[in-house]
Image (cartoon, helix red, strand yellow):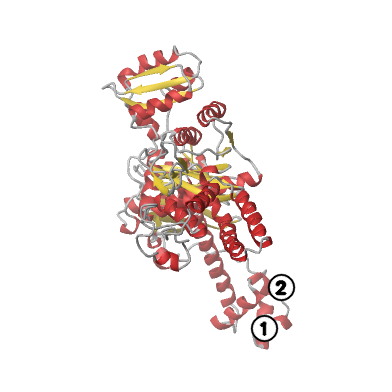
Amino acid sequence: MQQHLPELQDKANRLPLLPGVYIMLDEHNEVIYVGKAKKLKNRVTSYFHGEHLPKVAAMVEKVADFNVIVAALVLENSLIKRHKPHYNILLKDDKGYPFIRVDLKQEYPAMSIASRAGKDGARYFGPFGGRSQTRDIINTLSKALLLPDCSRRFPRDIGKERPCLNYHMGSCAGWCLRDSSAEDYRARMMQAVLILDGKSGELIEQLRAEMEQAAEELRFERAAALRDRLRAIESLQHKQRVISTAFADTDAIGFCRGAKTCFTVLHFVDGDLAGKDVEMMEEPLEEDSEAVSDLVRQYYTAHRGGWPKSILLPVEIEDREELETLLSETAGRRIYIETPKRGERLRLIESAAVNAREEIQRRTTQQQRRSKTLEWLQKALELENFPMRIEAFDISNLGDTGIVAAMTVHVDGKPLKRDYRKFRMRDLDGQDDYASMYQAVHRRFQHYVDGDEKFAPLPDLLLIDGGDVHAATAQRAVRELGLSVPIFGMVKDDRHRTRALITPDGREIGISGNQAVFALVGNIQEETHRSAITYQRQLRNESYNSTLDKIEGVGPKRRSDLMKAFKSVRAIREANVEQLRLVVPKNTAQAVYDYFHQEEAPPQSGRMPDSSPAGGANKEGD
């Protein structure tokens, strides 16, 4: 794009501040992206100034020219369908949403599955989530109303063969018998139509009245048959929420980015879930609000046969009014689009979000999710190498004493504990987080420069607990050794969670919008903090133990008993002889008390020694 940049900027600056559609073209004049904007000039010029997210930058790099059309929303949708641009988000067009077809012009109408609603005079109900669900609905209605669910055709097959097993099991009224009634069959089918129309309440009232009338006329066999049918239909009322998916009063939209991106539509009837549609795709170029707007428009302008009263969105969208008008005109009645902030409708949105996250989890392996997360991190941070090995540092101190640092290592997104390292600060004049961070990082990379294999290889990414000054301090320590490593600070929110990464020069990269990356970086930050705190406590306990070891009569067993009973050296120091005697023998209790209450010597401070070993495979190694 660089050679075309000046002319593209000039062309964009001359655009009007009007709503419309812009079409990005590559050097072969192929359409690579179609977008919409309320103000064309503002939106298009933004592509040719400043920095962008990796996927947007990749698209902009290929732009050789662009066209604009001052037009309505529906034009963008038709252009996307026509050109199928590489960088646009697209729903699959080949997904089937079957209907139930009933041709009431026939003497013996039957329920069948149709791929789409035709214009042949038959009644079509749906669409439903899939052919299996549609077949289940037909089977449920047939069993409840004792309609045939076999391969026989009527009136052709009446009286030709004996009734099948369904008749003998009581799940069919035996319409193949010679004395069966076409009028009764049609009446049963009309009852099925009422249920498919979402009017089972009317049908129940109708059957109850017929049953009571039959009982009054002493036609008890007829009344019993109506009673059984009434019970079967009443049991369908719960299942009717599934049958009435096409007549949902509310659709809640879920949208989630992860290893893949998921767009979910939950259909609710009276607050209860009646059906679900799911679309999986690669991560969209657009931000969440624009992506949701595009997906909703594509989803509802496709021929699906049923319209909700309200559509609930997880984010505010800029073109809500225009989209609401478009969908209302397409549906032939008013459709409301909302972004709920509280209450029951917010709960429906949260349920849709959970479903979207679960679909991503279900359809991707752990390895795929980790790889996608690290790939996103590489692009967002503009790293030269894939961040296979990530190291992180945190400082922990207790006032001016006991200052330590911990280094954790994550390889392929998983902790590699054998490579963790721990450092005790040396020669510091009081508490100084920046000096501590400099020392810890410098010592880690000095070991690498000196050829220490325990500190190889170099990380692909170094994360520092703190802001830009901490990151800059670490960068200085690395550069002074002639090395180059990508370094970012982990910036926390008011709940002590990492909300963003920050460069040493103060540029923030938000991560809260990607749940997987947010979780990964948060886990690294927490693990590094935990490691630093644990090491500090370990050294403090070693210091306490060394204090008790100086007392005559206190060996490892009695030292352990005292610490177990009093929890800390301070509590032991403050205990009287009687309290100490409850844990150790009389002579030892007196010796402990005397040690901490000698007039000529102040109590031990519990200060950590400067050179105790870090211990085990995690020791610093110097």
Instruction: Answer few, some or many: residues within 10 Å of disc 2's Cα (few below 14, many 20 plus, some between 14 and 19).
Output: few
Q: Is residue 321 above or below residue 253?
A: above
| Badge 1 amino acid | Ala
Residue 574 tag number: 2
Residue 605 occupies quadrant: bottom right
Q: Quadrant of residue 332?
A: top right
In the displayed structure image, the side of residue 115 where residue 297 appears, left or right: right
x, y percent for residue 179: 46, 59
- Give the percent coordinates (x, y) of residue 133: 44, 52
C-alpha separation, residue under disc 1 versus residue under disc 2: 13 Å
Regarding residue 461, the answer to whether it shows in the image is: no
Residue, disc 1:
589
Compare marks 1 and 2 and give the one earlier in the sequence. Answer: 2
Amino acid on which disc 2 is placed: Glu
Above/below status of 188 relative to 169 = above
Label 1 Cα neighbours within 10 Å, binned few <14 / some 14-19 / many ≥20: many
Dot 2: element: helix
Percent from the top left, x then y, of residue 507?
48, 35
| Image position of 240 with respect to 338: above or below | below
Q: Nearer the viewer, residue 156 or 296?
A: 156
Asked whether, in this view, residue 33 is left or right of residue 471, the answer is left
| Residue depicted at x 58% and y 42% | 249
